[in-house]
Amino acid sequence: MLAINLESEVERPDFVALDKEGQIILIAEVKGNPFDSNREKTKENAIWQIIEFLQAEKFLIPFAMFVDLENVLVFRWDGSNLLEVLNLNTADVLSHYEPEFHQKQIFHLYLAGLTEAWISDFCYHWKSEIPPGSKEMTKIGLSQLLEDGLTQP
């Protein structure tokens, strides 16, 4: 397994995805229950954390992801601008990995694990040949980069 060395003084992301050459291509920040009383503020703070992390790195990480109980947001990073390129419904995507997603309370660590499982499915198709959101992830160029890659917490 490849070891990554993220030498940032800012808080680490929940997980990263590496391409088949071992380069980080995606960082993910996940926010599940318990939520602050203000979800928008939580989302805004998480996106600022993502930007701080991306700016602190010495190499370009092309994609970032923010996941909460409602949305999976994927951003493209060009070194100075973070542009939202995809918005998926979290339950639609992750209920493939947790069929009772709509019926149970999902806490942060479990949401992070489900999200990482979904991204891992793009890497080596452990559950599906065509993971949920494949069409959209292919359109933005992320699924191609994930192929034969791996994830790390």
Image (tube, rainbow, N blue to C red):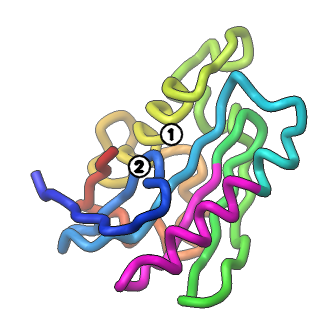
Against 1, residue 91 (above or below) is above
Tell me where residue 42 appears, x and y as whole percent.
77, 45
Find disc 2 in the rendering and name its residue: 15
Query: Residue at the location (52% across, 80% down)?
Result: 55
Q: Nearer the viewer, residue 136 or 56?
A: 56
Name the residue nearer the viewer: 107 or 99: 107
| Residue at image mark 1 | 115
**C-alpha distance separating marks 1 and 2:** 9 Å
What residue occupies the far front of the structure in this picture? Answer: 9
Q: Nearer the viewer, residue 59 or 96?
A: 59
Find residue 82 and report its horizontal and vertical position in percent: 67, 78
Query: Would you identify the image quadrant in which residue 149 lies?
Result: bottom left
What is the span of residues highlighted in magenta in the rendered image? 45-66
Q: Position of residue 99 (x, y in %)?
A: 58, 17
Element under label 2? Answer: strand
Image quadrant assignment for residue 25: bottom left
Compare residues 43 and 56 and report the one nearer the observer. Answer: 56
Name the outermost residue toward the left: 1
Q: Earlier in the sequence, mark 1 or mark 2?
A: 2
Q: Residue visible at 56% across and 50% down?
A: 29
Q: Amino acid at mark 1?
A: Thr
Q: Nearer the viewer, mark 1 or mark 2?
A: 2
